[in-house]
Image (spheres, rainbow, N blue to C red):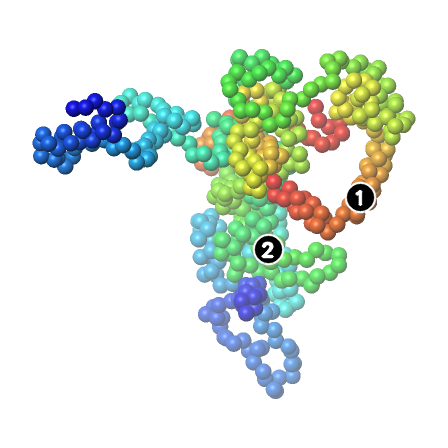
Amino acid sequence: MASTTCPLSSSLRRWVGSSSSSIPKAHSSRTYATRRPEKPPARFPDPLTSTPDISAVKLPDGVTFFRRPPPSAPTPLSTTLDPSSPLLRPLSTSTSAATSNETEPTTTVPPRLHTPRVFPSNQVLSDADFEKMRQLRAEQPEKYTRGRLAKMFNCAPFLVGQMAPLESLPHKDALEKREKLHEEVRSQWGERKQLIRAIRKKRREFW
Amino acid sequence: MVQAVKSLASKAAQIASTSASSLRQFPPKESLFNASSSSHTFFSPETWANLQKPPESSLTTFSHRIGLGNIVKNPDEIRQACTHPSYPPFYATHNAGEPTLSSNANLSTLGNSLLGLFATEYVRATYPHLPTRVLKAATSAYVGPRTCATVAREMGAGPLLRWNRPPPTSLTEPITINDALATIPRALTALVYQHRSLFTARKFAHSFFLSREVDLRPLLKFRDPKMALSLTVSKFQRERPISRLLKETGRLSNSPIFVVGIYSGSDKLGEGFGSSLKMAEYRAAEDSLHRLYLTRTPSDMLCLPSDAFSESDGFDSGEAVTPYVPGELGEVEVIYASKDRHT
């Protein structure tokens, strides 16, 4: 037999050799030069082990009880014996009190929706500062707005609004003035824009 | 065509109807035209039908049907309970000689107070954390005028009601058939109280009114649920609520779905879905508040304050009453969106 480097001739040899030694078999393990592309057999993960919400309990008589809650929205109804609101359950001992401390949660929680709020500074304003804020606002509410006062005292605008609110009458006047300006702008809108905004407003009612 | 049939049916339901078998003579003499008679009075069938007394058999059947057969034995009392205060003056104008009829005005007032008492204590005991205005709305839903009218119809008191629609004046509010029907279950509650005891009346109210299914979720609406939740959580002295994205799909398509959960630390307070992030967050805040407010006491653990009324106070207890164990008091609700009224 001549030695060959060509693979085709070697497979051909094999073929020829097998056919000459015995009667041809129907189920001969023949190889092909090219294989037809085939999808591998589908293997499905076991739902009893892959679903995250599943809970398994081994019962005394050897049976395992699997609880698989459906992925639909959970009902808000519950009883006082087992309330679904964590506010009604006793606080876990690991977390120490507090509303102000924002420690990182112990178990894994999903990602935040909004970026965490950033405070302008950690300084604590004194009562004299708030008094000054109120005075400035009362004198010239149009010049010393919440935003400007926040920048002056290096705090959040929300704090200015909470600690130095306007009196009801100047507040109402300011709101009316703003509403009038907005109304003028809204009257300039074209029909399509008006329609789109009206649809959005209606959608909000169904939230 | 369908509308005409419907309006005719509703009209027929409002007109009093009386069965011909209970009358001595039908058609009545005054309805037949007599040329020789001197007085040619106009005959109105509706007025004539309204003036007829309901037969005793129908009153007895009614009382047995609602389970008061052994409690209210006199059919005249049932007749009184079904007579609206607008009826006696109308009856007197057409039957001058007869004594004035008694209406259900006093019974209805007493029954209304009793129903209000039973419903309020039941709702309070069942939902200890419910806010006050929602409690009031729930009480109206359980024993309010519309419910009373519906219960009267379900009992079958529609044909037994005796009333007369007064002509609308500018001073008084118009009385509708629902207002008239609502007086009947109230009057029946008062009758049960008079004949038996407070506890029997309570049982009557529980079986007819407080066994009804009332969904309280539509009554819990907030102007700003996120702020309400934030203030509520600070009242319970927990970590401030933070919204977190649980699931999302199709963010840049025209029909996205977001599932947002609100967490206090690592505890999930509630979750909500929506087609925008803001909508999902809004619903999640509402769901958190629903989960808190709609926590209910199991019915076998329910302890009502009227159980504390004892014979020594003058209330005839009748059957054995469970000793009263006070239920838990919910945390007072936050009143937000008003100056200087929170914290």
Q: Residue at x 58, y 12 (%)?
A: A96
Q: Position of residue B114 (x, y in %)?
A: 58, 42
- The answer to whether residue A50 is visible is yes
Q: Residue at x 68, y 47 (%)?
A: A196
The dot on residue B178 is 2
- Asked if B308 appears above or below B67 in the picture, the reply is above
The dot on residue A83 is none
**Label 2 SS:** helix
Horizontally, residue B54 falls left or right of residue A57, namely right
The dot on residue A185 is 1
**Label 1 SS:** helix
Q: Residues within 10 Å of mark 2 (few under 14, many from 20)?
A: some
Q: Nearer the viewer, residue A8 or B269?
A: A8
Q: Quadrant of residue B232?
A: top right
Q: CA distance from mark 1 to mark 2?
A: 49 Å
- The answer to whether residue B74 is visible is no
Q: Residue at x 85, y 19 (%)?
A: A131
What is the chain identity of the residue bearing mark 1?
Answer: A
Horizontally, residue A184 falls left or right of residue B245, namely right
- Asked if B115 appears above or below A115 in the picture, the reply is below
Q: Residue at x 58, y 77 (%)?
A: B30
Image quarter hosting the N terminus of chain B: bottom right
Task: Residue lying at the far left in this picture: please name it.
Answer: A22
- Asked if A178 appears above or below A52 in the picture, the reply is below
The amino acid sitting under disc 1 is Val
Tally of numbered discs: 2
Q: Nearer the viewer, residue B219 or B53?
A: B219
Q: Position of residue B326 (x, y in %)?
A: 53, 26
What is the chain identity of the residue bearing mark 2?
Answer: B
Q: Nearer the viewer, residue A144 or B269?
A: A144
